Image (cartoon, helix red, strand yellow):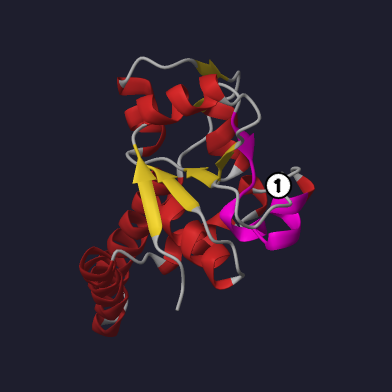
Amino acid sequence: MLPAVTTCNPADFARRQAENPALVLIDVRVPAEFSEIRAAGAVNLPLGDLSPASVEALGHRDPDAPVYLLCHSGKRARVAAEKLAAAGFQRLVVVSGGTEAWLAAGLPVVRGEGRGLSLERQVRIVVGALVLGGVLLANFTHPGFVWISGFAGAGLIFAGLTDFCGMGLLLAKAPWNRR
């Protein structure tokens, strides 16, 4: 049986880190998002690169010590926690609400120079382009192209029902979202 994944709010993590400065906060967002804004002191380890070896490379060698995970809103951090739980890590803590909640709590952040697009915005752009392209192609070339729009709509419904966004995972591997 996999260990339970717990949560803490950003203020709780900040208190814990003040008591134990050795605690590491792993931000699993893509580098473009991380460079835009991040929790002060967070270390970037994108979800696609996350592995037991990469966590251990950060100095986290005790599988019984807590691993704190953060993303934009909490969803990717939960996926990261499940991935690490399957690899044997026992104490996984998702900082609930992600960087949005961190910022709302008034905790220190580092703002970068670049203005990268978040994965969520990238997904919206691609889905919008698919819907518009499907409608235009269906209208001006062949009616069968309307299925492109239908496919994009079905993908959005699936993502909404399951909280799994395959397009987001694919976009995370795009060259502009890598280091």
Q: Which residue is drawn at 32% across and 70% down?
A: 137
Q: Residue at x 57, y 45 (%)?
A: 30
User: In this figure, which residue is indicated by the disc labeled 1?
Assistant: 60
Residue 74 in percent (x, y) is at 37, 47
Hey, which quadrant is residue 14 in on the image?
top left
Q: Is residue 93 left or right of residue 129?
A: right
Determine whether 1 is above or below 45 in the image: below
Hey, which quadrant is residue 3 in on the image?
bottom left
Relative depth, front residue between 113 and 149: 113
Relative depth, front residue between 67 and 128: 67
Give the quadrant of the N terminus.
bottom left
Mark 1 Cα within 10 Å, few/some/many (few <14, many 20+)? some
Q: Assess whether residue 127 is covered by the magenta stretch.
A: no
Find numbered disc 1 in the image and state the secondary structure of the residue it sits on: loop
Determine whether 155 is above or below 77 in the image: below
Residue 94 in percent (x, y) is at 42, 47
The segment highlighted magenta reads 42-56
Relative depth, front residue between 163 and 58: 58
Q: Assess whether residue 45 is covered by the magenta stretch.
A: yes
Q: Residue at x 49, y 58 (%)?
A: 81
Q: In this view, does 89 lie to the left or right of 156?
A: right
Relative depth, front residue between 110 and 69: 69
Residue 29 in view: no
What is the three-letter code of the residue carrying label 1? His
Q: In this view, does 98 lie to the left or right of 116?
A: left
